[in-house]
Amino acid sequence: MRLFFSPDQRRHAPALELHNGAFVPYAETPARVDAILAAIGPTELPGDAGEAAIRAVHDAGYIDFLKTAARRWQAAGRSGDAIPYAFPVVRRRDVPLDRIDAAMGRYAMDATTPITAESWKASYASAQSALAATQAVLAGDRAAFALCRPPGHHAGADYCGGYCHLNTAAIAAQAARDAGVQRVAILDIDYHHGNGTQDIFWERGDVFYASIHADPATDFPFYWGHLDETGAGEGAGATLNRPLPHGTSLDAFRRAQGEALTAIAAFAPGLLVVSFGADTWEGDPISHFALRTPDYAVLAREIAGCGWPTVVMMEGGYAVDSLGANVASFLGGV
């Protein structure tokens, strides 16, 4: 399996995030990739495919915001990383607002995703890793892995959140569609629901989105990922959510994944994108499932056994000391 990563993905390194009412050290650190790289071995440097595939998914105004937010924040006399504090949740309108505070809320879903002067460069590099892995599979490899960091599945077409700025899974899926793959499926097995991915493909019938995650009644992102969310318009029935309770271990997770794989098989995709998060591990500091390191190989073998060309995108996982072993277990199963 080919593995892709760019050192530029380390460049995003905020100091703090808002968590449970206090500013705490940022959890999605560059140390995550160092732990993974130590466990999986050498990776390939992705090429630069440009912005076209990113713009096929993300709003042009949002991309411009990501590129300029840190500079505008500093120009306004602010210290530290740019963090939003006001959100247009009622009658949101696309009105021109020059003040950076207004733009931060317009293009963000939470206050846990700071933007630094290096965030665009790191997120852009993460997208390039996703595109390189996708291209490898389109060229004939059975599977490839993109060590995406920052992660992507909480980012919508025009908003960041949940540590995510560019939605790498969506970028990969759309790139495959643009390359001629008629149907693409996304299987999201991160602890948290991939609200951004769901939003992007909500009304589309050519991309099937299935997610197994912590029940949003108890866990972030709260407002997405409930059982009754199944898509709309041409995408009606092309979204499948399987929320699970705290304490979920392998047997229950396998049952939910089996349901998702059965639904994906009925969709008959030409390519599968897996949003893989190791924050389902029993010792993850911000999550509450009970998967163990060997369990990831079991889950991965069941996915691989379906036989679809597969691109794996790295999402969450915050127990840095065990993260590498968990990722290696999953990739070994693939």
Image (tube, grey):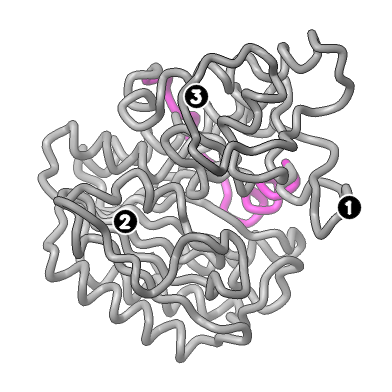
Mark 2: secondary structure: strand
Q: In this picture, is 194 found above or below 289?
A: above
Q: Nearer the viewer, residue 151 or 4?
A: 151
Q: CA distance from mark 2 to mark 3?
A: 23 Å
Closer to the camera: disc 2 or disc 3? 3
Residue 179: x and y in percent read 17, 32
Residue 208: x and y in percent read 24, 57
Tell me if 251 is positioned left or right of 317 in this view: left
Mark 3: secondary structure: helix
Q: Residues within 10 Å of mark 1 (few under 14, many from 20)?
A: few
Q: In this picture, is 323 found above or below 113?
A: below
* Magenta-colored stretch includes residue 185: no
Mark seen at residue 22: 1
Identified by mark 2, the residue type is Ile
Judge whether residue 49 can be spotted in this image: yes
Q: Which residue is mark 3?
A: 62
| Residue 130, picture quadrant | top left
| Residue 306, picture quadrant | bottom left
* Mark found first going from the N terminus, 2 or 3: 3
Q: Which residues are magenta?
A: 30-49
Q: Nearer the viewer, residue 312 or 195?
A: 195
* Mark found first going from the N terminus, 2 or 1: 1
* Magenta-colored stretch includes residue 47: yes
